[in-house]
Amino acid sequence: PKYADLILDNLIDLKPDGTFRLDQSYFDYCTGLRMTNAKFDELFGGPARKPEELLTQRHMDLAASIQAVTEEIVLRLTRALAKETGARNLCLAGGVALNCVANGKLLRDGSFDRIWIQPAAGDAGGALGAALAGYYHYKKNPRSLNGGGDAMRGSYLGPSFPQAEIERRLHAVGARFEPMAEGDLIEAAARDLADEKAVGWFQGRMEFGPRALGGRSILGDPRSDTMQKTLNLKIKYRESFRPFAPSVLREDVAEWFELEGDSPYMLLVADVAAKHRHAMTAEQQNLFGIDKLNVPRSAIPAVTHVDYSARIQTVHQETNPRYHALLSAFKRMTACPV
């Protein structure tokens, strides 16, 4: 993060308690059509990267620096909040709460015993807030607590579709399909995944929020060292370096990752367990950019970031039994619950 001091000296006035003030002269977000302006470009030695541009060291350094400053702000704010209130539980919302790397560091910091993050923490979550405000505040309906559990139960708040509607749509586009009993479907999908095929998973209610959580998901075998590139370039049509996230059986998460608790909404980053990592050679360590990223560094390379971390979803039998059954079948075939 070589630009972190430059950011702190010019862009942001950061106080010890985490409160801050941005110098808006570097930004056009509120008054124009761009996030930043020419003054920002001059400070950091060039314009913002275009999607089709190759990644350079400057791009990576700038991203790492902005991330480092963001994490420092989050930690200062939450430490001050814990000290001031004495609270041991923390709920987060807002777009920055989707920063899963910062969330993981916040959890490991230990200022709070339990952290819950609204899964649609970005702007879209305002719709849920408006609905709740209308129901409880304006309609004066009584509010009951459920004893401290997660009342969202997996964030599957969107629509589901009956079998007849699904078949009608498939016929309309000329798709070939075969209706299957649920157990047979799960076995067939798990076998395809074990054979390194990509699977489109469309089951039950749709997720509310930006993460695919086993309702509408593109699935692949995390053990494959080509799966990440294949999904990005042939299916998602995005840069090959973009990461994929692991879904793991809740009961197996501590066996595969350095995480003891729940992460049902894919909003926490933790490291792959040391016993599943592959050490990199000196030659591999000296590689740059995409070449270094493509080095398999664990038993599940398709979901392992360059620093051995992963953005984890814990899958719970009680909130998504069908997806849990799929992962269980995959584990039975491969000894991998991810």
Image (tube, rainbow, N blue to C red):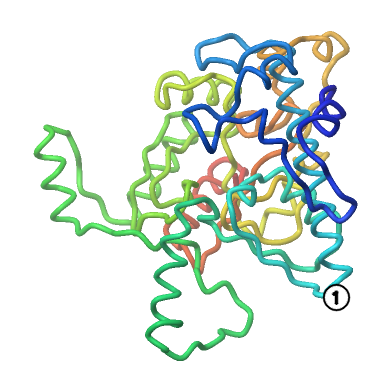
Secondary element type, mark 1: loop
Q: Which residue is mark 1?
A: 86
Dot 1 amino acid type: Gly
Residue at 90 percent across and 52 percent down: it is: 16
Position of residue 247 measured from the top left corner of the image (x, y, whole percent): 57, 47
Residue at 42 percent across and 27 percent down: it is: 236
Query: Which quarter of the image is occupied by the N terminus?
Result: top right
Q: Nearer the viewer, residue 95 or 101?
A: 95
Q: Residue furthest bottom?
A: 142
Position above or below: 164 against 291? below
Q: For residue 68, which quarter of the picture?
A: top right
Position of residue 241 measured from the top left corner of the image (x, y, whole percent): 59, 21
Position above or below: 26 against 253? above
Q: For residue 61, which quarter of the picture?
A: top right
Position above or below: 187 against 197? below
Q: For residue 289, which quarter of the picture?
A: top right
- Mark 1 is surrounded, within 10 Å at the Cα level, by few (under 14), some (14 to 19) or many (20 or more) other residues, namely few
Q: Nearer the viewer, residue 87 or 21?
A: 21
Does residue 264 appear to the left or right of 3 in the view shown?
A: left
